Amino acid sequence: MAEPQRVVAALPINAGDGFRQAMLKTAIETIPQLTEENHSIWKDKMTALLKLRGVLQTLDDTTLALGESDNAELVMLLLSKMDSVTHNNVITADNRDSAQKIWRSIKDRFASSQSSNRARIFNDFLYVKFQEDSVESFVTDIKVAIKKLVDVGIELPQDILAYLVLFKFPNSLQTLKRQIMHSDKELDVEFVCNHLIQFNNESRAESSQEKGLPTEAALFSSKNKVHSKNRASDKSGNQQSSSKRCRDGYHNPKQDGNHSSDNCWHLHPEVAPEWWTESQAQWKATQTQLRANKEKSKENYFISLLTLWIDSGDPKNRIILDSGASAHIFNDERFFESLQLGEFDFIKTGKQGATLPIKGKGSVLLKWGDRVIRLENCLFVPAIVINLISAGELDSKGCTLLSQKAEFVVSKD
């Protein structure tokens, strides 16, 4: 004959215990509805509430029986804290009137140690994708996925989990990945995630400061997307956002109350980790290249790379306005008003490793009708095929160059 179940009552709630009543009310309000995605956080909150109510052990132990009123109360609680999809997957005609059976069904669905469920949870972890536009969400997804692994009895060594997370990093973060893997610190998921978030925050602040954008701008600019709310930000708002960021050699104490000047890597780069120093060097090199390209584009906006200055049948008599030439270069002595002959180093041509000897330096006088242009510090290079006038040299002398439809105008105030 089966032994009858021992009925266990929940802890009574005293009407005079205001603190306990407030705690129960707050706990119930903060527990989300159980979905297919949030079981870990739902379980933690629900377990804490059931412990406070004194019924968790009874729910887990089917040899103990709940009182009728306690069972009705818990059935209502569990049913009210799951969404319709979960309700359809968990609640059956057999368990809908028993809080213990509902609790067991929830555990079987979300935390079962059966091989099929363990495989599903492990696959979910393996296929967590790195989110280039939301590093914080990626870190959260990783931590939730690992917690689900633990819930179904899969407890991998921390260093193995860390390697699996690092494997998800994109090619743009290979430097950070190497720095983390070669660190002398103990490798675990928390260490990896902390470094990733720090790297993201620093890079995002630098990017916002350079572009004048709010901090919502993404770390990875490969997609080159800026949300409309960023574009709508006024100039003063951008400047205010940018001014709050620490930058090279400067610490802003108002940026973060927990970020002191002693811990500011921009102010004390000597204490910064190697991966941050290397990433800063790469970022600065990229910015230098971008500025150089911008200047080049600005120059090319006014002039084409090669524009015919004087058109004649003999190429040796042609003069080309060249935005790539660093000096005025002529191939015939007749162009020079004054010329000092001698050996003056070489010039590099467009062909790799090719050079032409400089045979003299002087000034050139060009005349068109009543117009005269005097060019100083011109190079005499007899071997060059076409004469070149440097657009950069003209610009440095205060000249303005405008180009349109293969024609140009050079003017000077």
Image: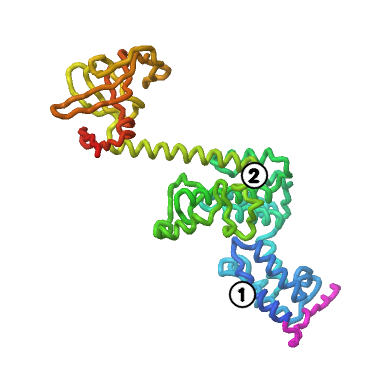
**Residue matched to label 2:** 272
Badge 2: residue crowd in 10 Å (few <14, some 14–19, many ≥20): some
The reply to whether discs 1 and 2 touch (Cβ–Cβ < 8 Å) is no
Q: Which residues are magenta?
A: 1-18
Q: How is the image coloured?
A: rainbow
Quarter of the rendering occupied by the N terminus: bottom right
* Residue 192 image point, x, y percent: 65, 47
**Residue matched to label 1:** 80
Answer with left or right where residue 366 lies relative to residue 243: left
Residue 17 lies within the magenta run: yes
Q: Nearer the viewer, residue 362 or 67?
A: 362
In the displayed structure, 290 sits above or below 234; it is above
Q: Nearer the viewer, residue 357 or 343?
A: 343
* Residue 187 image point, x, y percent: 71, 44
**Mark number, residue 151:** none
Q: Which is closer to the viewer, label 1 or label 2?
A: 2
Q: Nearer the viewer, residue 402 or 204?
A: 402
If you read the primary sequence from the N terminus, does the residue marked by circle 1 or circle 2 appear first? 1
Residue that lies at the very extreme toward the left in this rendered image: 369
The residue that appears at 54% across and 38% down in the rendered structure is 282
Residue 73's image quarter? bottom right
Q: Is residue 126 visible?
A: no
- SS for tag 1? helix
Badge 1: residue crowd in 10 Å (few <14, some 14–19, many ≥20): some
